[in-house]
Amino acid sequence: MCNDHTHNPTSHNKMTLSDKYGIIWDMLTALKISLLPTLFALLQSPSLLFSPRKVQGLLMANIWANGFGDGVNDSNRDLKTRIITPNAKGVVLDVGAGHGHTIRFLDKSKVTKYVALEPNVSMHPRIYEEAGTQRFDSVVCVLTLCSVPDVHRAAKTLHSVLKEGGV
């Protein structure tokens, strides 16, 4: 799900201008929605300038919080509803949870516990906001494996934390 574009072999020669240069628009939009909040945070805490990873995390959190997260979530709503809602049950591990958008697709009558795993600590407050206050029955991993250097190893690790019969 890292790429929203579907491959249609009959139309590969009909690439539009927005297909070719859409990434530039996306980058400009990301900068537009995240720059001011990030600069404001830097003004409030100038010592962040000595922690580039924290600034990067803050920038990403602002990108997701100010538009991209909800937009990506909405663009895949039907697919997530078909895959996640009927299958996630018991204790659910959400790998690369972002701001916890997956919570919206969980059937609360079938899920007993939700565990969000997100390496970007700047995204944690929104996870807590979405969620409220070992081994897993279900693992959800949306828009994550595309940014992992060793997908095979990551998939094996995810499979290893599933209970027998888990999904």
Image (cartoon, helix red, strand yellow):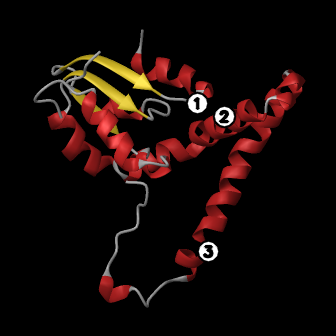
Separation of disc 2 and disc 3 at Cα? 26 Å
Mark 3, other Cα within 10 Å: few <14 / some 14–19 / many ≥20: few
Q: Are marks 1 and 2 in contact (CB under 8 Å)?
A: yes
Closer to the camera in the image, 29 or 5: 5
Separation of disc 1 and disc 2 at Cα? 6 Å
User: Which kind of residue does numbered mark 1 sit on?
Assistant: Asn
User: Which kind of residue does numbered mark 2 sit on?
Assistant: Gly
Closer to the camera in the image, 52 or 60: 52
Whether residue 106 is visible here, answered yes or no, is no
Residue tagged by mark 2? Answer: 57
Residue tagged by mark 3? Answer: 21
Instruction: Name the residue: 21% across, 44% down.
Output: 83
Position of 20 with respect to 9 (left or right) is right
Q: Is residue 39 above or below residue 72?
A: above
Instruction: Name the residue: 87% across, 23% down.
Output: 47
Residue tagged by mark 1? Answer: 120
Position of 38 with respect to 84 (left or right) is right
